[in-house]
Image (cartoon, rainbow, N blue to C red):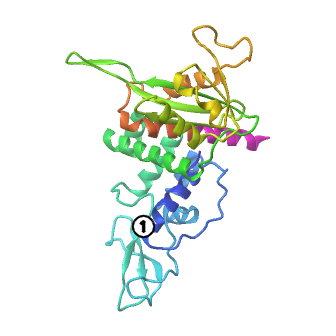
Amino acid sequence: MNIHEISYVIVNRNVKSAGFVYKHYNVNTEMPIKLKDLFIICESIEKIIQWCISIGLILDLTGEVCKKCSHGHFGLRKDSSFSNDIFYWKCSNKKCSKKVSIRNGSWFQGHNLSLEKILFITYFWIYKIDQEFVKHELSICNQTIVDWYNYCREVCIEILKTDSEKIGGDSVIVEIDESKFGKRKYHKGRQVEGQWVFGGIERDSKKSFFATVENRTKETLLKLIKDNIKPGTTIISDCWKAYDCLGSEGFEHLKVNHSVNFVDPETGAHTNTIESTWRALKKSLPKYGTVKSLYDTYFSQYCVRKKCITQKNKNKH
């Protein structure tokens, strides 16, 4: 994952609300930004804005028709009294002179941090830098870091929506399973349950999906299976009763009875891949747990990171 990839998601998500035409950028998204490169980029506000425009992190409104007067065109202007960003977009029509923040419709819109700090905090999140280090280096409070890391994970949800595709297919094996996340805790004598999560993973490609579920009924799980797995797929599961219908729903279905064997002695069916994925996924969560409402963001973060690692390895060959 790199900052280029995030820029495309952010711009595509926000540009419509900004009311301007999105311009496509010819950027090598496979080239990661090094920390030393980011320091050079952040040497001045001019360099920051130029670089952000070049990769689409800031909308390029150069030549765009002003929607207020319909006559003038926007150009980049410099005035330190306008904002801390110094630069802004201004209509060329002197009778109009509409001004637009360079943050409009961008990753930076609605945030008070400097462009420089936002770039660094995004970079640190991409490379899994500890929040205490970020706090020390950027001189910002813990809550700000938490908010931004949450924001970055929300972008992962958008990335998965953009690249959404069903997994599996003819002769492809997909392992499915449910797992409970979160430790059981006691508050004033009342037991608090964890969160059930349903997921599936292609055995060979490791393409996967995960979703929180309120229950494990046939109706709930079958909908997720049909939404995420192609017909004709060979699905391997445990003997949970909700899966009994899969053979009549357009899938090849193999079971493994975990109370007897980890690998079915007759068919060779097993769910070792999804089981190991659960362990990795749980390990990726915060050490001291998280609230239920954030689970989907962490799952999306895990999937996006995994996808980027897989793509990076493919590019090496």
Q: Amino acid at mark 1?
A: Ser
Residue at x 49%, y 56% (from the top left corner): 42
Answer left or right for 236 relative to 219: right
Residue for badge 1? 17
Decide if residue 102 is in sight here: no
Q: Is residue 217 left or right of residue 309?
A: left
Q: In this rendered view, identify the residue nearer to me: 228 or 113.
A: 228
Where the N terminus falls, by quadrant? top right
Q: Is residue 214 above or below residue 61?
A: above
Which of 225 and 165 lies nearest the eye of the viewer? 225
Which corner quadrant holds the C terminus?
top right
Residue located farthest toward the front when viewing the structure as drawn: 248
Can residue 240 be found in the magenta stretch?
A: no
Please tell me whether residue 310 belongs to the stretch shown in magenta. Answer: yes
Q: Is residue 190 above or below residue 205?
A: above
Question: Residue lying furthest top in this view?
Answer: 260
Residue 20 location in percent, x, y?
47, 73
Residue at the left extreme of this rendering: 188
Q: Which residues are magenta?
A: 305-317
Q: Position of residue 172 (x, y in %)?
A: 73, 34
Q: Position of residue 32 (x, y in %)?
A: 63, 48
Q: Residue at x 44, y 54 (%)?
A: 116
Q: Which x, y percent locates residue 23?
A: 57, 70
